[in-house]
Image (spheres, rainbow, N blue to C red):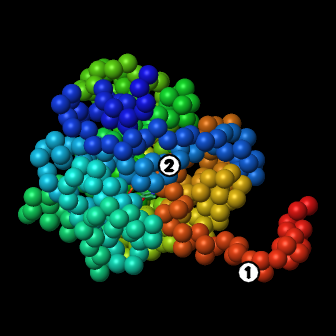
């Protein structure tokens, strides 16, 4: 058996590629599905909670799934440059995959509102970084206009190949569990990812007939279904950036979870369709709850995700209290990005290092306070 070579290689029968497509990959995907051992009990839940840790992708977020497809198709189409607007993770992935492909990348990021690790990645991979005096939504408008006028491929999730790559997360979860979960919870910003998850779950159950009601016999892949049921989809937003809860765009989105500091999501209709068809819901969490949950996960489970990613579990915790999840259910939460992306926010909310003499007695006295 050959070693794992990335998600296009793995799922090529379910993706829009041919044998002559030049695949640009960093062996993304195949991330672990980790069962939580402590938090379900602490939260009074008798079901199972598993986290799909997308922080373990090559650039540390789920964006690599979409970017391998978007850059592969851009290169196949002859593009010499790509562009995106980003709250940080898309820019890191775009920069890395452009480097891998040997093409130029341009990234527009909101001035001062991007986590340090993400900025370092875009710079290190040789992207031309444009820090605009505006937010993500302003950047999104600009890149759409720029991509019309200049010979650059737009690789935000309005590019349909992004969602094609990102849908593979559903296939991996079904294969790992041997079935679809009962619920799937995830953070929502620009709303591409919830739409891609639903596309993946739907294609995985599609019977390729009009009767199944999914593709109406139009499915392009003609494959056996991977499973029989789809999960209920639940999307969580930060309270200061929750357009799906307000029912309209939010003008000045604000949250500590900078990755989802977005007021005017591009995949509005697709995300609503995912929630409605699955009989799920949207809800919102405060910044305080997001940070507290990020810390609980790191402290009690050993999993370090970035604040935006913790929004999925902060929402779950809140809705478990409200009795919105069935007893005994299997819940999967997507942890979209790695905690190392945003060291400032992690250090800000943690116990600070002890300043201490390099002396055995002093150190052992301090240690005794911690050893019971
Ligand atoms: N979690 C993280 C860590 C993200 O970086 C993003 C989006 C989301 C969740 C939300 O996913 O936009 O598909 O609803 N980040 C984009 C970026 C906007 O530019 O990196 P979504």
Ligand 1 lies under 8 Å from the Cβ of mark 1: no
Residue at image coords 27%, 55%: 99
Please state, as top left, top right, bottom left or bottom right, where the N terminus lies in the image.
top left
Residue at image coords 87%, 70%: 364
In the image, residue 232 above or below residue 212? below
In the image, residue 174 above or below residue 352? above
Residue at image coords 62%, 48%: 324
Q: Are there few (<14), some (14-19), or many (20+) residues within 10 Å of tag 2?
A: many
- Residue 367 position within the rendered picture, expressed as x and y whole percent measured from the top left: 85, 68
Ligand 1 rendered quadrant: bottom left
- Distance between the alpha carbons at the discs numbered 1 and 2: 32 Å
- Residue 252 position within the rendered picture, expressed as x and y whole percent measured from the top left: 38, 76
Q: Nearer the viewer, residue 237 or 155?
A: 155
What residue would you read off at disc 1?
355
For residue 332, say whether it is visible: no
What residue would you read off at disc 2?
56
Please state, as top left, top right, bottom left or bottom right, where the C terminus lies in the image.
bottom right
For residue 21, say whether it is visible: yes
- Residue 231 position within the rendered picture, expressed as x and y whole percent measured from the top left: 50, 37
């Amino acid at each position: 058996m050959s070693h794992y070579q990335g998600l296009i290689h793995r799922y090529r029968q379910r993706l829009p590629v041919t044998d002559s497509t030049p695949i640009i990959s960093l062996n993304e995907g195949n991330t672990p599905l980790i069962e939580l051992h402590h938090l379900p009990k602490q939260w009074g839940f008798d079901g199972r909670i598993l986290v799909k840790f997308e922080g373990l992708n090559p650039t540390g977020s789920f964006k690599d799934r979409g970017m391998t497809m978007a850059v592969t198709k851009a290169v196949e189409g002859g593009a010499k440059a790509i562009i995106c607007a980003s709250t940080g993770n898309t820019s890191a992935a775009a920069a890395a995959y452009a480097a891998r492909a040997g093409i130029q990348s341009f990234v527009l990021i909101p001035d001062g509102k991007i986590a340090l690790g993400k900025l370092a990645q875009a710079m290190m991979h040789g992207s031309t970084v444009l820090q605009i005096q505006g937010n993500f939504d302003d950047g999104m408008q600009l890149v759409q206009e720029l991509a019309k006028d200049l010979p650059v491929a737009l690789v935000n999730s309005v590019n349909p190949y992004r969602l094609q790559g990102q849908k593979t997360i559903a296939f991996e979860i079904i294969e790992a569990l041997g079935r679809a979960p009962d619920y799937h919870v995830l953070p929502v910003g620009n709303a591409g990812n919830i739409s891609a998850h639903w596309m993946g779950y739907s294609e995985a159950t599609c019977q390729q007939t009009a009767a199944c009601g999914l593709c109406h016999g139009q499915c392009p892949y003609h494959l056996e279904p991977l499973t029989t049921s789809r999960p209920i989809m639940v999307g969580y937003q930060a309270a200061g950036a929750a357009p799906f809860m307000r029912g309209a765009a939010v003008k000045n989105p604000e949250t500590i979870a900078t990755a989802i500091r977005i007021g005017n999501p591009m995949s509005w209709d697709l995300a609503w369709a995912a929630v409605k068809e699955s009989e799920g819901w949207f809800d919102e969490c405060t910044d305080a709850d997001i940070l507290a949950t990020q810390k609980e996960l790191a402290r009690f489970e050993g999993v370090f995700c970035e604040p935006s990613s913790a929004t999925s579990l902060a929402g779950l915790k809140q809705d478990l209290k409200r009795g919105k999840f069935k007893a005994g259910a299997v819940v999967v939460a997507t942890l979209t990005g790695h905690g190392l992306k945003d060291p400032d926010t992690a250090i800000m909310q943690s116990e600070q290092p002890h300043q201490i003499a390099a002396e055995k007695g002093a150190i052992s006295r301090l240690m005794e306070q911690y050893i019971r």
